[in-house]
Image (cartoon, grey):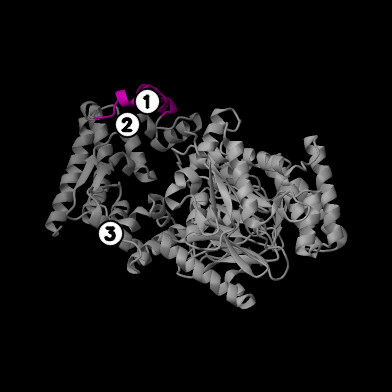
Amino acid sequence: MTTKYVYFFGNGKAEGDAKMRDLLGGKGANLAEMTNLGIPVPPGFTLSTQACAEYDELGGQWPASLEAEVKEHLAHLEKTLGAEFGSSENPLLVSVRSGAAVSMPGMMDTVLNLGLTPDAVAGLAKRTGNPRFAWDSYRRFINMFGDVVRGVPHEDFERILAGLKVERGVKLDTELKEADLQLLVEQYLNLFQEKTGEAFPTDPWQQLVQAVNAVFGSWNNERAIKYRRLNEIRGLIGTAVNVQSMVYGNMGETSATGVAFTRDPATGADEFYGEYLINAQGEDVVAGTRTPEPIAKLGKVMPALYQELVDVKNRLEKHYRDVQDIEFTIQDGTLYLLQTRSGKRTSAAAVKIAVDMVNEGMIDKNTALQRIDPKHIDQFLHPNFDPKADRNVIGKGLAASPGAATGKVYFTADDAEAAAYRGESVILVRTETSPEDIGGMHASKGILTARGGATSHAAVVARGMGKCCVAGCDALSIDYKTASAKLGGATIAQGDAISLDGTTGEVMLGEVPTIEPTLPQDLLTILSWADGERRMKVRANADTPEDATRAREFGAEGIGLCRTEHMFFDDTRISAVREMILADDTPAREKALAKLLPEQRKDFIGIFQAMDGLPVTIRLLDPPLHEFLPFEEKNQAEMAKVMGVAVEVVQDKVKQLHETNPMLGHRGCRLGVTYPEIYDMQVRAIVEAAKEVAQSGG
């Protein structure tokens, strides 16, 4: 039996549904599901993940029957729409998008307006009566095809566009005239030939084949592999390819495009959240080339279409029982949905949405718990900026992903990764981010961009990673050549410290102090539900009264390991420990230990009080002893001076105690065999502390 590789969707019927995401990818499965629900979706077809897997196995060749199947579905699409691929009268144009079973925002590549040729541009201009729109679509197609399919850098196209806008004295793409766009197309075609050594393809079928191959190939490009590794995505065989008829948001003032979430992905509030642009295509919103308008404003500009969009988003959220991230286009007054998927959200939003949906009867508690990643909980445990601290605010952008981040500025993903590897806290600063920046974004504490909105690549990926992000900071000017930026009258060099407040959108010069977080009620609710379901008890690692108190507040049911060697690292105590280590006989060691006894007893009293009624497991001193002594000669000399001994005494003791493998040295119970008086002191401190706490009612 011949394997089926291609699945059609359109006219209210689809060959797939949401359950087929492993085969059709998340995007393809949801397009099929929306089609079956009667939601307006431009028709098209999906090449399966199986086709991608076999393409890889065949070394970059299509499976034997795939070409015939694609051509059959292409003919069906032509018939459905009454248009013809490559026609000079009524051309069929398509988008080519990837879509794996798991959402990977920005990882895969998109090509819009595929099928445009010089003849098709003339046909599109004639059919729409809008030659400017036709040439605008063609220049976008050359840019995307050149970048995504043939590797001509997007920046090279942008440089030409920016130069022409300066020459014409305009700020926005939409201000360019038809003749300007024709010139732009000519310059883009010359750039393509210069970079690839080939003329731009004018056969629509070859355009489609090359685009499909590019999407298949993108499954194993560096950034896709890195994204899957960073997010621990395993077990997928490839990406599907969605070939979908084009609808246009750039046909004039009655057209628009946008990205929206059924609830606020930053806070979790039950509010329609998103952005749109009039007279634009989808990549204008996510790439941040123009600053979009908030979705609520669409209700004033196009009230009937806005209400239709609200009705659709409500249906989708209710159907999927989860927050949806949707892409939509309004073409000349008609609404189309291009995508729906489970929306990436911040930790705070994930917790609030889960609790709210349980309270609304949309999901049960077990489902809510399964939607909370342990990393979400971790985000609540990190400090926030101190509201009383001085803030040297030098600029403000959109609060795209909440949180507080302080770090050194780096302007490229590679530099950010390298700095993070050196142990630095990093803020990645970019004009706009792209999928190539994924490694640097992951390595950074926060992300700042000059362009883009709350649904831009930077914002969506940052929220998914739990990173602080400030986007669309228009006043930010970056000079990549000098590795510096200007904002609010300040010049920021690479390596300078800045702070980002992802809740307010503020950008501050220098490091802003932080305070410990407080846990919101929604999180406590989630944790209480988890307590009701769990079968395992959790104890803490805690070595001080402060750590024990914090652990108890977080719900620990005792201390599983109290490492007493961690109690000796402050200046006062480490001197007594070093005195003990340098001692040559038992009386001298006992003299030093007498100084440590009251400190140990005090610590254990605090720990037992914090853990009142709960078990505490204590590990008696268990260090490689040489770790308490300095290694460098300068530090050894300083220690000798403080201890009142010759430096040679310290050096001899370091050599004497050095252990090639500390696990076979004094660790375990062997320290107590060599120096039993150490454990005598510790056990006495523990017992006396327990007695004192018990006598006081603990």
196, above or below 337, in the image? above
Task: Tell me the kind of residue under disc 1.
Answer: Lys
Q: How far, Cα to Cα, is label 1 from label 3?
A: 55 Å
Residue to which mark 2 is pinned: 581
Residue 602 magenta-highlighted: no
Mark 1 burial class by Cα count in 10 Å: few <14, some 14-19, many 20+: some
The residue located at (72%, 44%) in the rendering is: 204
Task: Tell me the kind of residue under disc 3.
Answer: Trp
Q: Are marks 1 and 2 in contact (CB under 8 Å)?
A: yes
Q: In the picture provided, is 520 more to the left or to the right than 590?
A: right
SS class, disc 3: helix
**Residue 423 in sight here:** no
Residue to which mark 3 is pinned: 529
Magenta highlight range: 646-668
Q: Which residue is nearer to you in this view: 117 or 370?
A: 117
Across and down, in percent, residue 19 comes to 42, 50
The residue located at (45%, 68%) in the rendering is: 269
Task: Tell me the kind of residue under disc 2.
Answer: Ile
- Indicate which disc, 1 or 3, sits on the residue closer to the N terminus: 3
Please give the label number shown on residue 653. Answer: 1
Q: In the picture provided, is 347 more to the left or to the right than 394?
A: left
Q: How far, Cα to Cα, is label 2 from label 3?
A: 50 Å
